[in-house]
Image: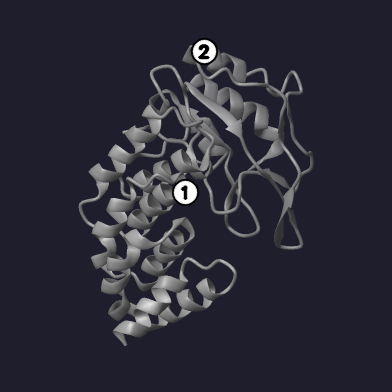
């Protein structure tokens, strides 16, 4: 069995097809395969490590915690992101500080705030209760349930939402629109941001600049009583607070379309 598991682990690197079968079989084997995957993890390339993370998440064996924590120091940003998210989704004990350090390292690299890694790590910190989502009062009152019982905001209130966020020193950077039709939810094209954020600008300037999005047409949203802003399963348009800055003067976007007070 050990030799067979080792062969499967080696196949995790082969993205042409064998990796998917190996992944499925390792998940089927379950916890018995975890020690060997942990031992073989350093020898895997990027694709193999990402696939191994998927196996860890499916098997949900807490013994993978130290291996996932070590991957927070990977040279690959996606490996770091997936490792942080896996640690959070598996609720591995004692990982808040390592994930926080991974986020600080991300900030020190001045990673663009809307890239996947900082978003994923912020999501992980929120999932680990190390970061508190914050929704301004008016925006919370304007929230409505869509057909899928996911929170959404009618696009008619988009200007109010943007101004409410700005009133609370928050900036909306992007969002997604959804149409509810016959009890189902569909993606709708938009919005379009026709402005270039100057990440080094003072925070107060960015807050006030965000207020001009709708009046100037920089943020164009589809109209209709059945059009909502916010992805299903999220809590609102993706935005950021001063505390989520990438560097002393750089505000990043918040992960998974939610508001947050960074911790």
Which disc number belongs to residue 78?
A: 1
Residue shown at 32%/45% (left/top)? 73
Q: Secondary structure at mark 2?
A: loop
Determine the residue located farthest toward the bottom in the rendered image. 1
Which disc number belongs to residue 2?
A: none
Q: Residues within 10 Å of mark 1 (few under 14, many from 20)?
A: some
Give the image location of residue 203, x and y in percent: 48, 15
3D distance between C-alphas at marks 1 and 2: 28 Å
Give the image location of residue 188, x and y in percent: 75, 47
State the residue position of label 2. Answer: 201
Residue shown at 54%/35% (left/top)? 114
For discs 1 and 2, the disc positioned in front in the rendered view: 1
Q: Is residue 76 above or below residue 2?
A: above
Give the image location of residue 18, x and y in percent: 54, 75
Label 1 vs 2, first from the N-terminus: 1
Whether residue 28 appears in this view of the structure is yes
Q: Is residue 198 above or below residue 113?
A: above
Q: Quadrant of the N terminus?
A: bottom left
Side (left or right) of 262 relative to 231: left
């Amino acid at each position: 069995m050990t030799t067979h598991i080792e062969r499967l682990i080696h196949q995790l690197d082969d993205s042409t097809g064998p990796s998917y079968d190996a992944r499925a079989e390792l998940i089927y084997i379950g916890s018995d395969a975890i020690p060997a995957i942990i031992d073989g993890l350093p020898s895997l390339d990027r694709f193999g490590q990402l696939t191994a993370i998927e196996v860890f998440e499916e098997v949900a064996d807490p013994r993978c915690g130290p291996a996932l924590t070590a991957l927070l120091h990977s040279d690959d940003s996606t490996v770091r992101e997936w490792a942080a998210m896996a640690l959070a989704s598996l609720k591995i004990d004692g990982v808040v500080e390592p994930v926080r350090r991974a986020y600080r390292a991300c900030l020190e690299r001045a990673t663009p705030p809307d890239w996947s890694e900082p978003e994923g790590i912020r999501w992980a910190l929120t999932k680990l209760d190390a970061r508190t989502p914050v929704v301004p009062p008016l925006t919370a009152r304007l929230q409505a349930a869509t057909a899928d019982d996911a929170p959404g905001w009618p696009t008619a209130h988009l200007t109010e939402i943007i101004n409410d966020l700005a009133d609370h020193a928050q900036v909306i950077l992007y969002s997604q629109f959804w149409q509810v039709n016959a009890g189902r939810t569909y993606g709708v094209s938009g919005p379009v941001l026709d402005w270039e954020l100057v990440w080094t600008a003072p925070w107060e300037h960015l807050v006030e600049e965000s207020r001009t999005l709708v009046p100037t047409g920089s943020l164009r949203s589809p109209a209709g009583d059945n059009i909502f802003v916010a992805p299903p399963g999220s809590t609102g348009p993706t935005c950021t607070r001063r505390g989520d800055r990438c560097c002393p003067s750089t505000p990043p976007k918040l992960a998974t379309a939610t508001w947050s007070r960074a911790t």
